Image (cartoon, helix red, strand yellow):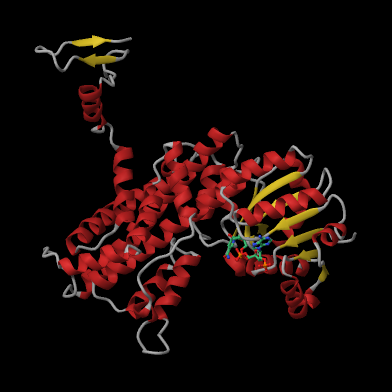
């Protein structure tokens, strides 16, 4: 028993993670249900470090030094449950089972309860960054007990991405906390991507710019506060020409966006917690609409006659000014989406009893993951200082950014409406901001309606207590119910 860590499941993610572990000096036991995959990994990469390939799970467990650490990276859902059970049968109290797949956090809570009852540790760990991240350094979000974290810390820190020299991994909290935070990370990723797509649409259809011109704009934006992985790859994608037709590649890609479910989970959980995550939910629904094939084909046949105006004829100077407006609107909307995502994490921490360090969450998202961005430094600082405790939008740096962007944000949303170009995340983020700022909301009228048809009662602004108006009676008397 020599290996200090093992990986079960050697497909794209597990294979890359095992190589990353070995490359960083870990002694890595490896197992895959189908042995051929293990052999292939050894044939191609066995010389990259110290591996202990196992033909059976029993052999795999026997090759691990105690306390054993086994990282599962198999298909999410039932296959993961099967592997957990099989490993737990072979392992001993004190050993650690890590599920590094994309589990839904309630599953992680359930699994942790079952495994810890058997005296073993179970750690649900979010891993972001795709295959390349797993190989070169992912952002890692482990949950589980403090005790298991002590054993995992040196191993995970050895393989995580580094941002400003610091490993992008932190213990998030008990049981499902890690997978919850990874889920919200993915939700934020959805809104980030949709905002970039809306910006592209405004420039392409609204301003009539070419893909190449827009690529240059994103490249320039990447040198601003928007600096991020997603902006960078967007420029790359827009520069790409299709080998077959010579057209911009983006023009030959079918406009139906896929999804695997983590965005939907983020929204479902936000609904359960009653936290508005309008940016994320609009991004999920935008993908949903894009994929409504029949509905969209039918809509084309309808050929709706609506008034709209493009700005192709706009003088260059004005066009440039509008592109700047889009940049500022993108930044403001992005800040709102992050503020909402962090609010969701805060609400979950309260509901599920997790002690989550939000500054640490922002820090470990600075490298390795899809939403890595320069401005996460600012977010981390804002939580560190306590300025963002209630909302990220109230931290002076972000408040100032929203105020600076305000004019642009409104101009972009109103122009988009005139162009007939949908900007669901731009506009819903602005609506959230305006709702949040409003001293008085029309919820007063809703309470009146609820009281009218359902006797749901209301509170008064000038007197404590619960009131109900007898709407059916002629002079509509108000009664105080408590
Ligand atoms: P897949 O999700 O495609 O799963 C394939 C692996 O699961 C293979 O090793 C396969 O073994 C194993 N497997 C499937 N069914 C069983 C079973 N019943 N019993 C035992 N093993 C089984 O692999 P990925 O590498 O893409 O992803 C692994 C995990 O990482 C998933 O949970 C995924 O959601 C998550 N993830 C993936 C990311 C990505 O970018 N791909 C990013 C972040 C997380 P066999 O070779 O025998 O078929």
- Residue 159 falls in which quadrant of the image? bottom right
Side of 229 where 292 appears, left or right: left
Residue at x 72%, y 69% (from the top left corner): 34
Q: Is residue 26 visible?
A: no
Where ligand 1 lies, by quadrant?
bottom right
Q: Position of residue 153 (x, y in %)?
A: 74, 51
Q: Closest to the observer: 374 or 22?
A: 22
Q: Is residue 275 visible?
A: yes
Q: Quadrant of the N terminus?
A: bottom right
Q: Position of residue 87 (x, y in %)?
A: 77, 53
Side of 200 where 411 appears, left or right: left
Please determine whether, in this image, residue 413 is positioned above or below residue 253: above
- Residue 287 falls in which quadrant of the image? bottom left
Q: Closest to the observer: 103 or 129?
A: 103
Residue at x 61%, y 47% (from the top left corner): 178
Residue farthest along the left direction in this orientation: 474
Q: Quadrant of the C terminus?
A: top left
Q: Position of residue 211 (x, y in %)?
A: 34, 78
Q: Position of residue 355 (x, y in %)?
A: 61, 37
Please determine whether, in this image, residue 411 is positioned above or below residue 123: below
Side of 104 where 432 appears, left or right: left
Residue at x 69%, y 69% (from the top left corner): 15
- Residue 440 falls in which quadrant of the image? top left
Residue at x 77%, y 42% (from the top left corner): 147
Q: Report the label total.
A: 0
């Amino acid at each position: 028993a020599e290996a200090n860590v093992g990986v079960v499941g050697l497909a794209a993610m597990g294979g890359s993670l095992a190589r990353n572990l070995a490359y960083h000096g870990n002694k890595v036991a490896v197992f895959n249900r189908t042995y051929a995959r293990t052999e292939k990994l050894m044939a191609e990469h066995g010389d990259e470090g110290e591996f202990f390939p196992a033909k059976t799970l029993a052999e795999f467990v026997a090759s691990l030094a105690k306390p054993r650490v086994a990282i599962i990276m198999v298909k999410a859902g039932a296959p993961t449950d099967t592997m957990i059970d099989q490993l737990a049968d072979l392992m001993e109290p004190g050993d650690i089972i890590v599920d590094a797949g994309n589990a839904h956090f309630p599953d992680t809570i359930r699994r942790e309860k079952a495994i810890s009852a058997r005296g073993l540790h179970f750690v649900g760990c979010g891993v972001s960054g795709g295959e390349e991240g797993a190989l070169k350094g992912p952002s890692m979000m482990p949950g589980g007990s403090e005790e298991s974290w002590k054993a995992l810390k040196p191993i995970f820190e050895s393989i995580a991405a580094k941002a400003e020299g610091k490993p992008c991994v932190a213990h998030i909290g008990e049981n499902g906390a890690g997978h919850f935070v990874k889920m919200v990370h993915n939700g934020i990723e959805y809104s980030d991507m949709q905002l970039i797509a809306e910006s592209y649409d405004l420039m392409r259809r609204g301003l009539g710019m070419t893909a190449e011109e827009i690529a240059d704009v994103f490249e320039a934006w990447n040198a601003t506060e928007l600096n991020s992985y997603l902006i960078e790859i967007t420029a790359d994608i827009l520069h790409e020409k299709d080998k077959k037709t010579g057209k911009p590649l983006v023009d030959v890609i079918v406009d139906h966006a896929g999804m695997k479910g983590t965005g939907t989970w983020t929204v479902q959980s936000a609904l359960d917690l009653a936290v508005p995550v309008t940016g994320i939910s609009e991004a999920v629904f935008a993908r949903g609409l894009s994929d409504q094939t029949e509905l969209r084909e039918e809509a084309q046949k309808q050929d709706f006659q609506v008034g709209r105006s493009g700005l192709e004829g706009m003088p260059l100077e004005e066009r440039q000014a509008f592109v700047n407006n889009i940049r500022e609107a993108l930044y403001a909307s992005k800040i709102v989406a992050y503020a909402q995502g962090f609010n969701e994490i805060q609400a979950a921490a309260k509901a599920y009893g997790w002690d989550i360090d939000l500054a640490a969450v922002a820090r470990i998202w600075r490298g390795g993951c899809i939403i890595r961005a320069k401005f996460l430094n600012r977010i981390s600082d804002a939580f560190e200082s306590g300025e963002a405790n209630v909302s990220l939008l109230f931290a002076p740096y972000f408040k100032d950014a929203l105020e600076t962007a305000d004019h642009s944000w409104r101009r972009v949303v109103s122009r988009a409406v005139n162009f007939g170009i949908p900007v669901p995340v731009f506009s819903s983020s602005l609506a959230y901001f305006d709702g949040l700022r409003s001293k008085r909301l029309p919820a007063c009228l809703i309470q009146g309606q609820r009281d009218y048809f359902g006797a749901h009662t209301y509170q008064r602004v000038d007197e404590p207590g619960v009131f109900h108006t007898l709407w059916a009676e002629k002079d509509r008397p108000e009664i105080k119910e408590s």
